[in-house]
């Protein structure tokens, strides 16, 4: 069994990996594992899966690809990083003793953690020769479309994202994520594949990986504006520490300081309008959420207000990644604020 933070390295796929469940991976691999797989073409494609242990679609898609090409060379060489297998064993995003894997990549403010050291090792190894491209595959807990995230507004990044979905999100915060780190070395994309367990998500991710493996090169022509709907993350909205909260219909409203509307995640990538209610709040409860933009400035009072016993909007917003999972909200955020932007000329 690997020690905490030790990176396991493999040059071939153990046969047991081809038909195991994600909950079996910790027993099988012993810890975070990096595989190099030969292919007919190089440089290799870098694929990261299971940064969050409750997001299995990436691993399941890779498993399908490996089964398809079992006994044959892949169309392109691959670096495969199977990340938080310990959390996957328990079906959790992250374990209590861990830091979030996808906040620990180079560029993180705290590079002294076990997880940061681990991710630095991975980047050093896979970028000794620049990869063809980098793909980080995720699920999300709320109701979201499939979309790609990029960190540079450059042609190869746009094409990599548009190959997956028309909806593309550009962001520079939070830092310490895989795609930001890898964007320093090659075109990189994060794939958000909807909720775990959906067959459509698995099929979509599998087809995308296969398409990338067969790609000779990323197109050099400018992406046609109609082929991509580009949004930018402008702020993150989090619960203030110590606030008790839940959702209508799922909790005793009288026991909570804040009770959010139960359809909040249905507005992801849609819109909520000025004056719309987000939550009921107990009398005397101060502002329970905090919105900060990329430079850290607090814009809460510009976007939200407590009016009577309601938390309401002061302006129209486009939310994304809103979730009804209270544990994810505590570990990460309530949702992000987006705005539509034009493709650079």
Image (cartoon, rainbow, N blue to C red):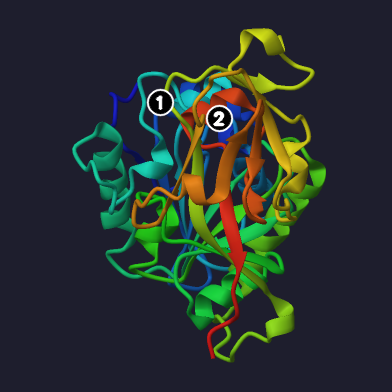
Circle 1 is placed at which residue position? 30
Instruction: Indicate the quadrant where residue 152 lies.
Output: bottom left
Q: Which mark is residue 190?
A: none
Q: Residue at x 34, y 69 (%)?
A: 185
Q: Position of residue 258 (x, y in %)?
A: 61, 22
Position of the C terminus, as image quadrant, is bottom right
Residue underneath mark 2: 328
Disc 2 residue crowd, few under 14, some 14–19, many 20+, Cα 10 Å: some
| Residue visible at 60% across and 55% down in the picture | 191
**Residue 297 higher or lower than 132, as above or below:** above
Quadrant in which the N terminus appears: top left
Q: Is residue 306 above or below residue 180?
A: above
User: Is 165 on the left-hand or right-hand side of 31?
Assistant: right
Camera-side residue of 141 and 309: 309
Instruction: Give the vertical position of 300 relative to 345 (above or below).
Output: above
Name which residue lies at 50% across and 59% down: 234
User: Could you tell me how many numbered marks the image carries?
Assistant: 2
Is residue 335 in view? no
Q: Position of residue 233 (x, y in %)?
A: 53, 59
């Amino acid at each position: 069994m690997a020690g905490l933070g030790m990176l396991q390295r493999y040059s071939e796929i153990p046969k047991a990996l081809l038909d195991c469940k994600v909950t079996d991976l910790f027993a099988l691999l012993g810890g975070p594992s990096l595989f190099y797989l030969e292919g007919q073409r190089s440089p290799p494609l870098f694929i990261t899966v299971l940064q969050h242990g409750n997001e299995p679609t990436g691993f399941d898609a890779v498993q399908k690809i490996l089964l398809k090409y079992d006994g044959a060379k892949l169309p392109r060489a691959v670096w495969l990083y199977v990340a938080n297998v310990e959390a996957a064993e328990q079906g959790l995003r992250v374990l209590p003793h861990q830091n979030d894997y996808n906040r620990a990549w180079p560029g993180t403010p705290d590079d002294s953690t076990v997880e940061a050291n681990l991710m630095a090792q991975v980047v050093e190894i896979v970028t000794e020769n620049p990869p063809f491209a980098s793909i980080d595959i995720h699920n999300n807990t709320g109701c979201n479309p499939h979309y790609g995230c990029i960190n540079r507004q450059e042609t190869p990044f746009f094409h990599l994202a548009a190959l997956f979905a028309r909806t593309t999100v550009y962001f520079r915060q939070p830092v310490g994520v895989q795609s930001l780190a890898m964007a320093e070395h090659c075109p990189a994309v994060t794939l958000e594949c909807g909720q775990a367990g959906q067959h459509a998500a698995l099929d979509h991710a599998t087809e995308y990986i296969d398409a990338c493996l067969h790609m000779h090169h990323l197109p050099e022509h400018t992406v046609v504006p109609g082929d991509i709907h580009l949004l930018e993350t402008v702020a993150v909205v989090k619960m203030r520490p110590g606030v008790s909260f839940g959702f209508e219909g799922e909790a005793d409203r009288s026991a909570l300081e804040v009770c959010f509307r139960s359809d909040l995640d249905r507005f992801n990538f849609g819109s909520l309008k000025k004056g719309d209610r987000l939550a009921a709040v107990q009398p005397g409860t101060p502002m329970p959420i905090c919105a900060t933009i990329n430079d850290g400035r607090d814009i809460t009072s510009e976007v939200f207000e407590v009016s009577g016993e309601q938390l309401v909007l002061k302006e129209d917003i486009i939310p994304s990644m809103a979730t009804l999972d209270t544990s994810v909200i505590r570990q990460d955020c309530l949702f992000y604020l987006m705005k539509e932007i034009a493709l650079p000329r």
